[in-house]
Amino acid sequence: MNQTFTPLQLKERKFLPKDFIVTDWNALQPYYEQLVSREINSLDDLHRWLDDVSELEAVVSEDACWRQIHMTCDTTNKEFETSFTFFCMEIEPKIKPYGFQLNKKLLDCPFTKQLDPASYFPYLRGVENAAALYREENVPLQAEVNLLAQQYGVISGAMSVEIDGKEYTLQQAAKFLQSPERPLRETVFSKVATRRLKDRNELNELFDKLLALRQQIARNAGFDNYRDYKFRELGRFDYTPEDCFAFHQAVKEHIVPLQAMLVKHRQRRLGVDVMRPWDGDAEPVGTQPLHPFKDGKELAEKAVETFNRLSPFFSGCLTTMQSMNRLDLESRKGKAPGGYNCPLAETGVPFIFMNAAGTMGDVITMMHEGGHAVHSFLSHPLELSSFKEYPMEIAELASMSMELFTMEHWDVFFNDTKELHRAQLEEMERIISVLPWIATIDKYQHWLYTNPGHTVQQREEAWINILNEFSTGITDWSGFEEYRRSFWQKQLHLFEVPFYYIEYGIAQLGAIAMWRQYRQNREQALTNYSNALALGYTKTLKELYETAGIRFDFSPSYIKELAAFVTPVLKEMGVE
């Protein structure tokens, strides 16, 4: 695929003043009032109205995103926290009633039926869904939930441990778990466990508050539980909770055995009689951990070169982000955990945030978030902001496929062939091991929200039962039972974005299918990939996956088929 990169042109504002910035509600409200009261007397009027709604949404969205970006980049900065809190409490709750009115205006407009269904069907379906779910009494509750959820990042961002007299964030400390020195790994693992347990009660209390608020929101909207409400809110039109249960069962039957193969392979390489929790990422004595880059600058440069091997367009996306300072890659104290690509709706050039500490995992994260960034660039030319609000099942397909596409080009990071093969095997280990973890987290969420009123003890018992269900049973957790009981607290999605996790599993299966296609016909796979991402959310999920040349399918038979493709690949890599 040799598509060249063309810089994005900033769309000229036609509704808001060019110098308008979001300050407070008084400045914004008149524009919402204008849109609500405007007469629509023709299809052309409707298109102009939609363009103006889209422009306002883009400006507000980008402002909100920057507030969150600033806060996650520095959780210690009170001005950033205040700015984010102000938006959550003083602006967003006032926007939502107008959003409902605008949705109703669109649905009631006689010309809406004349909009081209080839592009507008998913959007209008989403508008109908949002209008049906809207409850005025939920607006302040949702604002409170958003504010509380951000406290998870504040609490986690403050966690650090001391190793050899030096302070490390938990993300930075993770690199020591790759060390060939087993006593060092055990020490670091113990320190991280102790530090996490220190905030165990505080995180349980935070989660209890979030749980109660979310259940209330669901009841207000007429649902028996938050799970069923959230499925509707997330627009899961193409699958049901029962499909998720089938996914869980299929992963247990067809993927956990592959994970067991990989764990035993590592155990043989390490030469240990019993695998312990600190051995999962380790290398044998005499083998040093992979060091693919030394700092964020080098990571960015090597990522650009890797992307360029696939397509000049892909590398052009990253160099544009570099030039606009939209990469914050290195871990530091006070920075929120995790990593993300944040689309910026008006300018179109996204922001990548991550906590790189020099590990191979950081390379994978960069490839992953870079895939999201490419998706942002490809879909930005679409007419309406809402067309670019694609669901996570396609968003994560973009990122996870990019990991696998780039894998053969990781010699950019490694001069030594043996190190390159180690890195590729590490990626395969991560892919296989993440599917049981996704099934674990997803099944746990179904339990959490269909068992309201449960105690912390019941919650931990349910967690352990589900965790054991998707475990290989090979690793011995003796002495760390309490840490394992609260291990779910490390998954930020449970606190910040509930039920957003099965998407990773669906997309990971899709990415394996994309990789299979790539190994058969490289150019066709990359073309299909780009064509699908450029559609944003103007097609259904099944249609988007078809455009990408694969199936939207996570049935047991399909998972078995993909596992059968992966098994010989693992054997090629020396895994028996």
Image (tube, rainbow, N blue to C red):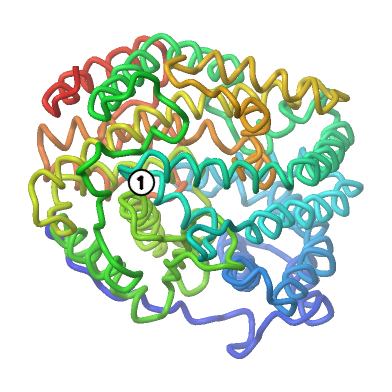
Instruction: Report x, y in % for residue 72.
Output: 60, 65
Local crowd size for mark 1, using a 10 Å CA cut-off: few (<14), some (14–19), many (≥20)? many
Residue at 82% across, 27% down:
223
Residue lying at the far bottom of the rendered structure: 19
Q: Return the residue nearer the eye: 139 or 572.
A: 572
Identity, as a three-letter code, of the amino acid under mark 1: Ala
From the viewer's perspective, tell me whether residue 540 is left or right of residue 307: right
**Element type where label 1 sits in the image:** helix
Q: Is 194 situated left or right of 269 in this image? A: right
Number of residue marks:
1
Percent position (x, y) of residue 153? 66, 56
Q: Foreground residue, 163 or 459?
A: 163
Position in image of residue 468 (x %, y %): 56, 16
- Residue at point 75%, 26% (across, down): 449
User: Residue at 71% across / 56% down in the picture?
Assistant: 155
Is 466 situated above or below 370?
A: above
Please give the residue where the numbered disc 1 appears in the rendered image.
Answer: 398
Q: Quadrant of residue 567?
A: top left
Q: Quadrant of residue 252?
A: top left
Image location of residue 522, percent across then percent down: 12, 42
Q: Nearer the viewer, residue 52 or 11?
A: 11
Relative vertical location of residue 564 with respect to residue 263 in this rendering, above or below: above
- 467 vs 339: above or below: above
From the viewer's perspective, tell me whether residue 113 is left or right of residue 427. right
Image quarter hosting the C terminus: top left
| Residue 322 seen in this snapshot | yes
**x 37%, y 40%: residue:** 397
Observer-nearest of 307 and 568? 568
Residue 61, can we see it? no
Most extreme residue toward the right, as rendered?
A: 137
Q: Looking at the rendering, which quadrant does residue 131 occupy?
A: top right
